[in-house]
Image (tube, rainbow, N blue to C red):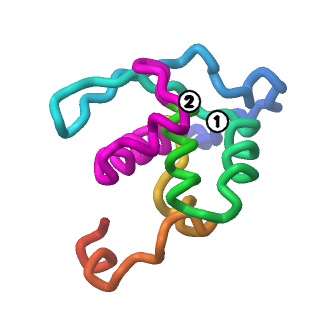
């Protein structure tokens, strides 16, 4: 009987670690309308963090402004969105950019889970 070997681990190349800046995803909002998202880069996250000055709402606002390509929105336009819709889009951008809610909570960009959320698995 042959011994099972683990798959070979290859050395990553720089190109393997880059965000695909051309990646796009259509996201259908709870309103039934769709937007087109792009993945955020580390530079985007750095700029958003600097601009938001540790304010979670401003952080989410800039995520939407940077992460939505259609329709294109300025931060001033994002400020006029309905709050639940703005957070829905920010969550979609975060998910598409592989930034899960747990990582955002750990970084301080989302409030801690309530006991009810923890029980429900949200």
Looking at the rendered image, the quarter that the N terminus falls into is top right
Point out residue 73 in the picture as x, y percentages from the top left corner.
48, 27
Rounded to the nearest whole Å, what is the CA distance between mark 1 and mark 2? 29 Å
Asked if the residue under mark 2 is in contact with the one under mark 1, i.e. CB atoms within 8 Å, the reply is no
Which residue is farthest left? Answer: 32
**1 or 2: mark nearer the eye:** 2
Which residue is farthest top? Answer: 22
Point out residue 25 in the picture as x, y percentages from the top left corner.
41, 22
Residue 19 in the image: above or below residue 85: above
Q: Residues within 10 Å of mark 2 (few under 14, many from 20)?
A: many
Residue 108 left/right relative to 68: right
* Residue 31 belongs to magenta span: no
Q: Residues within 10 Å of mark 1 (few under 14, many from 20)?
A: few
Element marked by disc 2: loop
The residue that label 1 is drawn on is 7
Point out residue 27 in the picture as x, y percentages from the top left corner.
32, 28
Residue stretch in magenta:
68-95
Looking at the picture, tell me which residue is in the foreground, 72 or 94: 72
* Residue at the spot 46% in from the left edge and 34% down from the top edge: 77
Residue 119 left/right relative to 25: left
Residue 92 in the image: above or below residue 83: above
The residue that label 2 is drawn on is 39
In terms of secondary structure, what is the magenta stretch mainly? helix
Residue 62 left/right relative to 88: right
* Residue 87 belongs to magenta span: yes
Element marked by disc 1: loop
Q: Which mark is residue 30?
A: none
Looking at the rendered image, the quarter that the C terminus falls into is bottom left
Q: Quadrant of residue 95?
A: top left
* Residue at the spot 30% in from the left edge and 75% down from the top edge: 117
Looking at the picture, tell me which residue is in the foreground, 95 or 63: 63
């Amino acid at each position: 009987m042959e011994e099972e070997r683990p798959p070979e681990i290859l050395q990553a190349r720089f190109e393997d670690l880059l965000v695909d800046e051309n990646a796009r995803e259509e996201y259908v909002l709870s309103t039934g309308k769709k937007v087109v998202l792009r993945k955020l880069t580390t530079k985007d996250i750095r700029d958003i963090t600097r601009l938001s000055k540790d304010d979670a709402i401003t952080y989410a606002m800039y995520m939407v402004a940077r992460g939505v390509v259609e329709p294109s929105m300025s931060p001033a336009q994002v400020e006029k969105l309905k709050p639940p819709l703005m957070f829905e889009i920010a969550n979609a951008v975060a998910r598409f950019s592989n930034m899960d809610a747990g990582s955002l909570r750990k970084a301080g960009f989302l409030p801690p889970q309530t006991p009810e959320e923890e029980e429900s698995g949200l």
